Image (spheres, grey):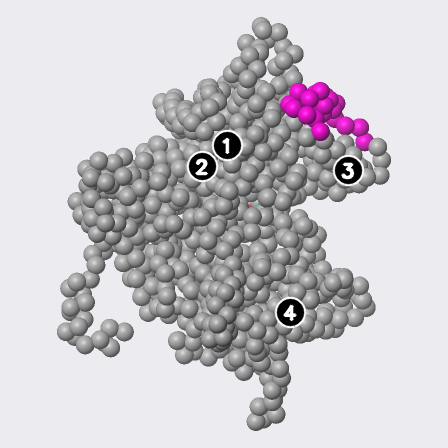
């Protein structure tokens, strides 16, 4: 590569090549230079915002030098790359993460102190990058961290939304959504104005015949939108590897359309076109586990998929290899069905633009893609109406019909007698209007389909994708249990615990090999160690108590048991059951004598999470939680025995404060509904215990840490269907304690009962789909066991230590290694040290 550049030029480039800083002194120099030049400020008006900006620019420049080295090395190695396509990347803050991953946080701390700043205050200045809804988006972010830390040649591809997930405000107990305009100042991205792709929409398909009489489909006319790349550097931990997250931003293409309009004096409509094009990447859809079939969403999906594939194909073509080698160079992972159009787009590129035969192209396509399913909830499975598709992507619809035709023909050959099977597995649902079933398309077009925890992977094989197991064989389906990055979720969020663990396990090695945590087992009985452990937990609770005081005005006792449920608000996650349990506790406290109250275990019930703006039931749950808090927190009879807190605007950076402060966290979904859950892993890793159902990854967590160290309750997934049946076809009696809770709500104890009528009716009248009543007694009893257990602090802390010691399995590093081996067939590269 270098030989193409003349010797003298090479020397000049090398001589002046940027050297990444490593000392506090060089870091300070960089910061001051950015304050004085890039930001045009000075010592006299450098506030914390400016110090944050300058520190970030210093680190970003450091990252980009190593980004260049990494990319050059990967290009030179010319091996297989992984592309992770995700509509969501819930990255959170970048500065703290960058400092820790490159191992220079102490250097930065010293440098900033010299300049008159506390590093904690500077880190706090950063606005979260919140391009995601919940677990699915945060998983993608953890995966990027692991891919870089393990040294895999990997790129993420996503959309550069102008507005991330909305900011949640609580006004009079209700959720109010405020737009999250986060791009005002974002030092973590590099616009690549030279990496632009034109993306086509609408138009029509015409058939042409070439000189050999072969017919070719050509997609013509319609409108063009321009995709511009923005690159976000992703530093690995304890390596010089910096991978790339490429986000696409939309703009009107300056093609003939607007030219004509400008020339004919139609300025306004030209500007309107521009605005319309920019709308594509304007906003993240705020739904979690729900699809609503909006045209703009399909536009987003195609825009992003087409730009990404163009980029991937262009990179492959530079290698001048034969097309059949494409799957040896490229592995594309589909994060849920959102990028399923990539399957169709690659087939289109190969047959329409590159002239391959259908069979050869399809072979390449299916070897390239893997599909991850994240939910079995029917309302979350994507379907697009055929007329909408026909209008927006006419050629893609034709190709989908062909994919379906060949697929159904093969099914018919294999199972000639099963007519209904064809209708059941058809990619096109024969409804009116007809619908394209994206999950079926993703299965047919991928060589591997995986679920995200064992139970979930079993469930998809026996329920929603059962027929496909029969057709393709069980080998196409596999499990990769989710994981989390211990760098962010232990080292960054809980530095004191991380240090304590390091002191007993031989340094920070556990952050790269989490199984080393098992060395902690021998300290589970160590008095001194337990004391330090408990002190750290208390300090983390004090930190959260301070946040609660600052944001809600409520004073909570850090010595009370902190019981936390933070996640998206959803009926299947059952925050309603939690708050009903809290009300039950309140009724109990009120019924006690002053003497009895003295023996009662004090508790702080903490909630956090966003409701989708159109999800009325979820919003009622938030309202109930806040209404209960308003009464309970001001009841003199109760005092410190019970506090109910709703933390506004739960996001990644708040999770970093909340998770280390839990004694118990709640993962209480109706069995069989939560695919995996990942915050369960984060809470246990931070020395909190879990109260949970036998659902998702809770089951595997229990297997790893031991059932003495977790509080499980409730019905099992295998019984859920029968129980629902009972509700529908006979009169079931409500659990008596739950009945009492409902009666209490009906006394208007928490404000007008009408406000909460729908929550009660869902249980009493509409079949209790999520089995709140069936599980309530078991839930309440298990909460009592939690109270009992917490009283014996010695034993409690021992449980926490044992649990942490056994959490090694749940690192996203293990997860990524499994994907690499069983789905992508890629090897990590040799380690790369900082220069
Ligand atoms: C699943 F289908 C979806 C979705 O739309 N959004 C989302 O966050 C979650 N998920 C699951 O609900 C979790 O159980 C799981 O841990 C997470 O995806 C990551 O796999």
State yes or no: discs 2 and 1 in contact (Cβ < 8 Å): yes
191 horizontally vs 325: left or right: left
Which mark is drawn over residue 647? 1
Q: Position of residue 723 (x, y in %)?
A: 76, 38
Name the residue tied to disc 4. 391
Task: State the residue position of label 3.
Answer: 767
Q: Residues within 10 Å of mark 1 (few under 14, many from 20)?
A: many
Element on which disc 2 rests: helix
Taking the magenta stretch, the answer to whether it contains residue 735 is yes
Vertical relation: 511 (above or below) 356: above
* Front residue of 65 and 549: 549
Q: Is residue 422 left or right of residue 487?
A: right
| Highlighted magenta segment, given as a residue range | 732-754
Residue at x 36%, y 61% (from the top left corner): 191
x%, y% of residue 380?
64, 51
Q: Where does the image place residue 556, in percent across and percent down from the top left?
A: 47, 21
Q: Is mark 2 within 8 Å of ligand 1?
A: no
């Amino acid at each position: 590569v270098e030989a193409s550049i003349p010797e003298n030029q090479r020397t000049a480039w090398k001589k002046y090549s940027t050297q990444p800083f490593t000392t506090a002194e060089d870091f300070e120099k960089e910061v001051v230079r950015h304050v004085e030049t890039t930001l045009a400020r000075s010592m006299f008006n450098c506030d914390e915002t400016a110090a944050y900006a300058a520190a970030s620019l210093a680190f970003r420049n450091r990252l980009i030098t190593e980004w260049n080295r990494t990319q050059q090395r990967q290009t030179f190695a010319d091996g297989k790359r992984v592309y992770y396509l995700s509509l969501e990347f819930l990255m959170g803050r970048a500065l703290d993460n960058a400092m820790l991953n490159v191992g220079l946080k102490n250097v930065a701390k010293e440098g900033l102190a010299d300049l008159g700043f506390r590093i904690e205050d500077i880190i706090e200045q950063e606005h979260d990058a919140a391009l995601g809804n919940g677990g699915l988006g945060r998983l993608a972010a953890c995966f990027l961290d692991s891919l870089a830390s393990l040294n895999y040649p990997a790129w993420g591809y996503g959309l550069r939304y102008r507005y991330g997930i909305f900011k949640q405000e609580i006004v009079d107990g209700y959720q109010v959504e405020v737009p999250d305009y986060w791009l005002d100042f974002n030092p973590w991205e590099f616009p690549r104005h030279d990496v632009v792709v034109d993306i086509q929409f609408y138009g029509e398909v015409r058939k042409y015949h070439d000189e050999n009489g072969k017919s070719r489909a050509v997609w013509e006319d319609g409108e063009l939108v321009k995709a511009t790349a923005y690159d976000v550097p992703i530093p690995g931990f304890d390596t010089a590897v910096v991978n790339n997250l490429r986000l696409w931003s939309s703009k009107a293409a300056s093609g003939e359309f607007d030219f004509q309009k400008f020339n004919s004096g139609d300025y306004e409509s030209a500007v309107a076109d521009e605005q319309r094009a920019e709308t594509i990447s304007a906003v993240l859809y705020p739904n979690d586990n729900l699809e609503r079939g909006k045209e703009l969403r399909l536009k987003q999906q195609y825009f992003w998929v087409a730009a990404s594939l163009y980029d991937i194909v262009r990179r492959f073509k530079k290698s001048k290899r034969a097309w059949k080698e494409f799957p040896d160079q490229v592995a594309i992972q589909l994060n849920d069905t959102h990028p399923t159009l990539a399957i169709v787009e690659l087939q289109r590129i190969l047959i329409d633009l590159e002239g391959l035969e259908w069979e050869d192209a399809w072979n390449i396509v299916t070897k390239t893609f893997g599909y991850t399913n994240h939910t079995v909830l029917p309302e979350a499975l994507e379907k697009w109406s055929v007329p909408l598709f026909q209008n927006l992507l006419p050629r893609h619809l034709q190709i989908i019909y062909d994919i379906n035709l060949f697929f159904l023909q093969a099914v018919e050959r294999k199972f000639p007698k099963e007519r209904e099977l064809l209708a059941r597995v058809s990619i096109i649902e024969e409804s009116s209007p007809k619908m394209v079933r994206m999950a079926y398309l993703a299965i047919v077009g991928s060589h591997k389909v995986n679920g995200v925890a064992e139970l979930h992977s079993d469930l998809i094989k026996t329920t929603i994708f059962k027929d496909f197991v029969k057709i393709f064989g069980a080998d196409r389906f596999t499990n990769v249990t989710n994981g989390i990055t211990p760098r962010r979720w232990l080292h960054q969020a809980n530095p004191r615990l991380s240090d304590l663990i390091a002191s007993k396990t031989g340094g920070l090695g556990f952050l790269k090999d989490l199984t080393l945590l098992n060395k902690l087992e021998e300290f589970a009985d160590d008095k001194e160690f337990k004391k330090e452990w408990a002190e750290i937990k208390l300090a983390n609770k004090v930190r959260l108590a301070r946040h609660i005081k600052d944001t809600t005005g409520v004073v909570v006792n850090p010595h009370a048991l902190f019981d936390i449920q933070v996640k998206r608000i959803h009926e299947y996650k059952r925050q309603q059951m939690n708050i009903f349990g809290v009300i039950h506790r309140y009724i109990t406290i009120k019924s006690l004598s002053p003497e009895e109250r003295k023996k009662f275990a004090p508790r702080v019930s903490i909630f956090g999470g966003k409701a989708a703006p159109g999800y009325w039931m979820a919003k009622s749950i938030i309202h109930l939680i806040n209404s209960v808090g308003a009464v309970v927190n001001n009841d003199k009879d109760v005092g410190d025995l019970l506090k109910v807190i709703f933390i506004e605007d739960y996001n990644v950076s708040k999770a970093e404060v909340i998770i280390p402060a839990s004694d118990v966290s709640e993962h209480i979904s109706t069995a069989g509904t939560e695919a995996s859950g990942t915050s369960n892993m984060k809470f246990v890793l931070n020395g909190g215990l879990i109260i949970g159902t036998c659902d998702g990854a809770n089951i595997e967590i229990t297997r790893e840490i031991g059932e003495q160290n977790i509080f499980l309750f409730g019905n099992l997934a295998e019984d859920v269907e029968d129980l629902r049946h009972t509700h529908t076809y006979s009169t079931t009696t409500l659990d008596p304690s739950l009945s009492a809770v409902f009666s209490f709500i009906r006394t208007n104890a928490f404000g007008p009962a009408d406000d909460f009528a729908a929550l009660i009716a869902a249980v009493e009248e509409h079949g209790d789909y999520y089995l709140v009543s069936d599980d309530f007694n078991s839930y309440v009893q298990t909460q009592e066991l939690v109270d009992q257990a917490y009283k014996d602090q010695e034993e409690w802390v021992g449980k926490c230590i044992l649990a942490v010691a056994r959490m090694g399995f749940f690192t996203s590093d293990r997860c990524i290694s499994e994907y690499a081996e069983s789905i992508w067939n890629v090897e990590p590269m040799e380690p790369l040290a900082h220069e």
